[in-house]
Image (spheres, rainbow, N blue to C red):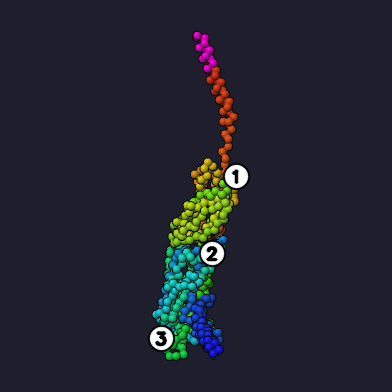
């Protein structure tokens, strides 16, 4: 019994230790929404914060039909460095009792701060960058879905030398040209953010603790005093506090700032066979040729298929848009394939060409296709008879660039083959027998006349 009690006591102690350890593993502070961490909930109540804080990078992704697409391979690089000293900061008087505005000047951030980015919801972080690969998926919508990725600012390596407000500058590095190579449209959000870190003395000598963070867009003085006392150009709104490199209404300029954007479209290729039921399960060869020389980043497409009478459609290997071609696609009657997440392109439009080959020996089909239209005149213009080993007309689809984004980003090229049997010639069958009789009669007449002449000579 004593042993059982001892074991129980040990287990209880272990549970208490583990519970204490669990509370020590607090989550990163998050500069979401208003760009502030550590607002005083009651006057003069400064709560100690973690040594890491998250800001965010936003990319809006567009697609008319799909809920998600694969991201292009692209890196956004980030640095964190000391910011400006001697910027006046006046806080709001209601943060204190009795009410009064406290004033300090910023100090330049100290060495030891680091930044890292995560593209998998914070599971893993990469130093100094957001490293997008084709395994990352952007959530999409017709109006543009917001995708936000955390950037972790880590101040645990900083040795604070005094209490105060330490200013840092965070810079995003990627050119608009490099974004275009990935099919990403450059937004109007600036590439610079500023982060103030609020530090106080701890309970022991030489100990310092972080009790607040703010993130903002302008390297300003920040004055929260009443209008009569504040300097007009230094009011809080002029700093434009926010949660990082995200879209919003700039409170300094009163203008909307847009996030970087990724525009994509989908393409469905379908097959219908008419009048040749014996070939309903025959898979006709198709060729797909995509072109956009301006999008050279590695792109991966999603795809879905409808089996119908049969389909052979291995995935297209990730590549630049101009290499996203398919020469071994085979589609039978009632089958279709949809390629999802083809980049629209920024300055240059994306072009897709599709054609079909008739490989049924001794058979002719009337081939036609409908490209995003039900207009019969347009469809009739594509009609072409294709005999064995011949190709259909090339269906040519060009998608407008993101600067004039095509809202109908779900496109379909619907191929229809109708059996065309060669009819009996008719004329030859009706005339030939009589012609043969006539020729035979003439031959017999000539032969009989010759024999008669020979008999008379004898």
Residue in the foreground of this view, choosing between 43 and 61: 61
Residue most extreme to the left: 111
Task: Single out the mark in the foreground, 2 or 1.
Answer: 1
| Residue 450 located within the stretch drawn in magenta | yes
Residue 107 in the figure: left or right of residue 399? left
Q: Specify the quadrant of the image occupied by residue 445.
A: top right
Most frequent secondary structure within the magenta stretch: helix
Q: Is residue 133 above or below residue 399?
A: below
Q: Around disc 1, counting alpha carbons within 10 Å, would you say few (fewer than 14), some (14 to 19), or many (20 or more)?
A: few
Quick one: label 3, few (<14), some, or many (20+) residues within 10 Å?
few
Q: Which residue is mark 2?
A: 68
Q: Which residue shows up at 58% across the image and 35% down it?
A: 424
In the image, is 294 to the left or to the right of 434? Answer: left
Q: Quadrant of residue 43?
A: bottom right
Q: Is residue 444 above or below residue 311?
A: above
- Look at mark 3 in the image and give the residue it sits on: 161
User: On screen, 429 above or below 229?
Assistant: above
**Is residue 339 or residue 421 the one in the foreground?**
421
Q: Residue at x 45, y 77 (%)?
A: 153
- For the N terminus, give its image quadrant: bottom right
Q: Is residue 130 visible?
A: yes
Residue 70 part of the magenta-drawn span: no
Q: Position of residue 271 (x, y in %)?
A: 56, 51
Q: Which residues are magenta?
A: 446-458
């Amino acid at each position: 019994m004593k042993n059982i009690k001892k074991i129980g006591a040990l287990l209880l102690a272990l549970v208490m230790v583990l519970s204490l350890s669990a509370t020590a593993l607090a989550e990163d502070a998050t500069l979401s929404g208003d760009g502030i961490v550590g607002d005083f909930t009651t006057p003069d109540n400064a709560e100690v914060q973690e040594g890491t804080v998250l800001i965010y990078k936003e990319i809006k992704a567009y697609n008319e039909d799909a809920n998600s697409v694969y991201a292009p391979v692209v890196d956004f690089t980030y640095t964190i460095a000391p910011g400006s000293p001697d910027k006046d900061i006046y806080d709001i008087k209601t943060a204190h009792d009795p009410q009064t505005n406290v004033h300090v000047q910023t100090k330049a951030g100290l060495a030891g701060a680091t930044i890292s980015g995560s593209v998998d919801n914070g599971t893993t972080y990469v130093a100094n960058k957001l490293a997008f690969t084709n395994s990352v998926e952007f959530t999409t919508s017709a109006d543009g879905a917001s995708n936000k990725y955390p950037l972790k600012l880590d101040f645990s390596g900083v040795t604070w030398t005094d209490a105060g407000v330490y200013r840092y500058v965070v810079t995003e590095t990627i050119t608009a040209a490099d974004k275009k190579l990935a099919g990403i449209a450059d937004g109007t959000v600036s590439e610079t953010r500023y982060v103030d870190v609020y530090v106080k003395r701890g309970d022991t000598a030489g100990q310092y603790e972080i009790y607040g963070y703010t993130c903002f867009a302008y390297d300003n003085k920040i004055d929260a005093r009443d209008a009569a006392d504040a300097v007009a150009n230094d009011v809080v709104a002029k700093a434009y506090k926010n949660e990082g490199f995200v879209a919003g209404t700039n409170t300094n300029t009163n203008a909307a700032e847009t996030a970087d954007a990724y525009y994509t479209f989908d393409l469905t290729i379908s097959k219908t066979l008419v009048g040749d039921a014996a070939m309903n399960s025959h898979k006709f060869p198709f060729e797909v040729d995509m072109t956009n020389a301006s999008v050279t980043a590695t792109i991966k497409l999603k795809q879905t298929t409808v089996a119908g009478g049969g389909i052979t459609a291995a995935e297209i290997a990730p590549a630049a848009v101009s290499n996203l071609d398919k020469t071994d696609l085979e589609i039978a009657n009632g089958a279709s394939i949809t390629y999802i997440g083809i980049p629209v392109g920024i300055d240059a439009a994306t072009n897709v060409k599709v054609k079909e080959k008739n490989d049924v020996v001794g058979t002719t089909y009337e081939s036609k296709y409908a490209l995003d239209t039900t207009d019969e005149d347009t469809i009739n213009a594509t009609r072409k008879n294709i005999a064995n080993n011949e190709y259909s007309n090339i269906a040519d689809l060009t998608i407008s660039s993101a600067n004039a984004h095509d809202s109908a980003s779900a496109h379909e090229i619907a191929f229809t083959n109708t059996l065309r049997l060669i009819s009996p010639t008719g004329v030859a069958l009706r005339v030939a027998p009589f012609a043969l009789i006539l020729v035979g009669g003439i031959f017999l007449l000539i032969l009989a006349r010759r024999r008669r002449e020979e008999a008379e000579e004898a």
